[in-house]
Image (spheres, helix red, strand yellow):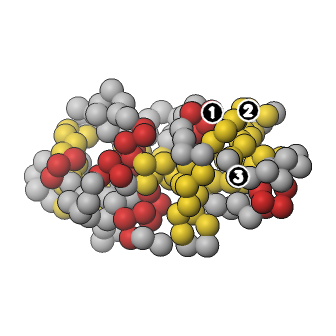
Amino acid sequence: MNPDLEQGRSKNRNEGDESQRLVALGRISGLYGVRGWVKVYSDTRPRENILGYSPWYLLQNGQWRVHHVLAGRPQGKTLVAQLEGCDDRDQARLLLGATVAVRRHQLGDDDEGYLWADLEGLEVVTTGGSRLGVVDHLMETGSNDVLVVRGERERLIPWLPEQVVREVLLDEGRILVDWDPDF
């Protein structure tokens, strides 16, 4: 796997064109019917958003391959999609388990100018200058989202802009937080 593509994260934000980075959005989770449709597990919110992006880049046998989405829809509790060139169940079976990713530029920006995927890999530093580690991923909780920061130990830092998360400095590759390093 290309090191810039691991789990949709760029390992070095200064290398290459950031807009071309692949961001994982889900995976092919099953087969649907006999005409090559696949079931899709989506990490997007709402989950149907994944169907609005095309092309998809599917990770198959360690290589990313481009697949254009011809159609897609919710089907019961899952999503289903028809991909160009995937016309029967046998072809669809070859896609099972494949990670679904898109280019970063396809996602645009949210109101804050960045997405969760942009935060992964950023260094987390306290307002006092202590380095806490690097954002491994974010997770949703009932009350607020949480940064999972890995350094000398794992820390869970609440995503509370202005209270805890003081500044996101994408160009510098870091997030400034008001957080006790002993916590």
Badges 1 and 2: C-beta atoms under 8 Å apart? yes
Residue 172 seen in this snapshot: yes
Say if mark 3 contacts mark 1, CB within 8 Å.
no
Residue at far right of view = 34
Q: Amino acid at mark 1?
A: Glu
Q: Mark 1 packing: few (<14 Cα in 10 Å), some, or many (20+)?
A: some
Q: Could you say where residue 95 lies in the image, as x and y percent from the top left?
A: 70, 60
Residue at which label 1 appears: 48
Residue at the spot of label 2: 74
* Spot occupied by residue 73 in the image (x, y as percentages of width and height): 72, 32
Disc on the earlier residue, 3 or 2: 2
Which residue: 55% across, 72% down? 62
Which residue carries the number 3 mark?
85
Secondary structure under tag 2 reads strand
Residue 105 falls in image quadrant: top left
Q: Which mark is residue 110?
A: none
100 to 46, vertically: above or below: below
Question: Can residue 100 be seen by looking at this rendering?
Answer: no
* Real-space Cα separation, disc 1 to disc 2, in angstroms: 7 Å
Amino acid bearing label 2: Pro
Q: Residue at x 21, y 54 (%)?
A: 173
| Whole-percent x, y for residue 169 in the image | 18, 45
In three-dimensional space, the C-alpha distance between marks 3 and 2, rounded to whole angstroms, equals 21 Å
Please tell me which residue is depicted at 39% across the width and 46% down the height of the picture: 104
* Residue placed furthest toward the front: 85
Left or right: where does residue 120 sit relative to residue 181?
right
Query: Of the residues under marks 3 and 1, which one precedes in the sequence?
Result: 1
Give the CA distance from mark 3 to mark 1. 22 Å
Crowding at mark 2 (Cα within 10 Å: few <14, some 14-19, many 20+): some
Give how far across and how far down residue 5 sits, in percent: 42, 63
